Amino acid sequence: MSLRRIATTPFSDQKPGTSGLRKKVTVFQQPHYVENFVQAIFDMLGEKRQGATLVVGGDGRFLNREVVQATLKIAAASGFARVLVGQGGLLSTPAASNMIRISGAIGGVVLSASHNPGGPDGDFGIKFNAANGGPAPEEITGAIFRRASAITEYAMMEVPDLDLDRLGEQRLGDCVVAVVDPVADYTTMMRKLVDFDAIAKLFAGGFRMQFDAMSAITGPYAHAILEGALGAAPGTVRNGTPLPDFGGHHPDPNPVHAAELMAAMMGADAPEFGAASDGDGDRNMIVAPGLFVTPSDSLAILAAHAHRAPGYARGLAGVARSMPTSRAVDRVAKALGIECYETPTGWKFFGNLLDSGRITLCGEESAGTGSDHVREKDGLWAVLLWLNILAATGQRADAIVRDHWARFGRDYYTRHDYEEVDASAAQGLMTALRAKLGTLPGQSFAGLTVSACDDFAYTDPVDGSVTEQQGVRILFAEDARAVFRLSGTGTVGATLRVYLERFEPDAARHALDTQQVLEPVVAAAREIAEIVRHTGREAPSVVT
Ligand code: VG1
Ligand code: CO
């Protein structure tokens, strides 16, 4: 077995975005592309990697196995003493986060493009998570990018591929590679957080649910936990086998891409509860019978009821939401007398708040909810916490949502995405919008009056770091808000995200159609940002 040094030249585009380096599969298939980036991650760690433990795993999408193999061989050549890899090269993102934390690893290489489509024409991604189990903060991703932009050589052990399907230890030179069960530790952790007995009793009493794993990574976890440990009826988990191309679907749990589940939940014989997760298992969608629960509402509801689960019985230290997430959770925090933090989009910004014990729960409008149990959002965990709440209250899921609105008011919410817009046109829109911010307050659009607006900047309360230009916020006097930002996870052109919301305190007006309620906010947003003029698009490509 020998170590081979391979000369290489840098690629100029290895800059991680909202959540790691995400590109088309074909980009990662270029010779040296994967190796350069992985070596850049390890170089960034410097001498600390000598003798350290590393976690490796991914969501099973096309190219997963090949990149796992390359990562193991580079890791062995880079001086790691031990590498934990999920069987089959699989690990959901929250399970990877947990494994990093409980194994004392220096970090992990997580392979995923999350909710983006997979397959040879789809997307792939590589992300580095730090020792706290969370996505590397900006200073680390910046250092990886700088290293990748100057790399001239990488080193690999020259060995045949490892057997990723056989549990147990294999040697790669001085490095021990342990192939581990990707589900077991995760299940153990869930047992500590939620009341498995109470949920099992619920299922034993005939409670029906549907969980759509979208042919992605949560299938094995959901089979083991929902149908196995909790005794849900066989068939509760649909699309439960991970496929390299997710069966040709978009593994994004929202009403558009989880259409079958939505149809089942809106039907006359709907089960009591519906849920779905995404490509890498960190997102969740919650559907009550006849009622889609927006992720922003779900976060607020979980915050209001979390104390019913054993892991949160002591109450919450504080909560946080990403800036574009609705203000529903702020109202719960106020009632609980705890702090609510507003962070830029992306889970990495919750890391310091969680590590310092300032918050217990956090979430994003993009179907992400999590707690201090790991440092990623966690799709199946959110589903289990919901089930715990249903078991503890004995209430129907839709009743819980309606009671919540009656108590706190309802934040009508929608997101309009304009995908694959010409990148410079999208930049032009944002630049023009920023330039006119000073003139907007006091002006009226579609019957709404701008009361304040800004370009969101965040000062991390723990380390004082400042992150600017995180999205334009327009507040209206009518208790409505529009937010504009460009996606940092897309791989083709640019995606403009427009987040729209309006608060309604009057319980008599809580059963209205969301798009109808938000029509004036949508119209004002279009006018203010001149969306049609800049993008040439008359309508968004996805409305969630
Ligand atoms: C999107 C979401 C963001 C989420 C990120 C990663 O980012 O808006 O809330 O944290 O995806 O989620 P963007 O920059 O495209 O808006 V996942 O499930 O990819 O790990
Ligand atoms: Co994801």
Image (cartoon, rainbow, N blue to C red):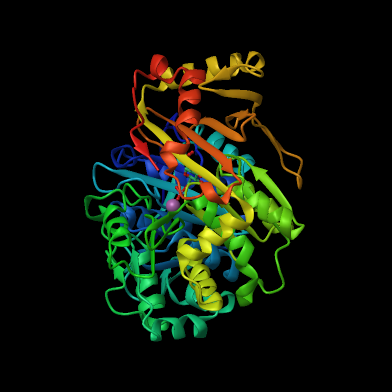
Residue at 48% across / 55% down in the picture?
A: 109
Q: Position of residue 488 (x, y in %)?
A: 48, 36
Please indicate, yes or no, whether residue 484 appears anywhere in the rendered image. yes
**Extreme residue in the front direction:** 508
Residue at 66% across / 43% down in the picture?
A: 342
Q: Position of residue 96 (x, y in %)?
A: 49, 63
431 over 241 or under it: above or below: above
Residue at 44% across / 48% down in the picture?
A: 126
Looking at the image, which is closer to me, 206 or 383? Answer: 206
Could you tell me which quadrant the N terminus lies in? Answer: bottom left
Looking at the image, which is closer to me, 220 or 178? Answer: 220
424 over 355 or under it: above or below: above
296 over 307 or under it: above or below: above
Could you tell me which quadrant the C terminus lies in? Answer: top left
Q: Position of residue 288 (x, y in %)?
A: 41, 62
Left or right placement of residue 344 versus residue 199 in this view: right
Looking at the image, which is closer to me, 30 or 330? Answer: 330
- In which quarter of the view is residue 436 placed? top right
Left or right placement of residue 198 versus residue 513 in this view: right
Residue at 67% across / 49% down in the picture?
A: 330
- In which quarter of the view is residue 195 placed? bottom right
Left or right placement of residue 55 versus residue 165 in this view: right
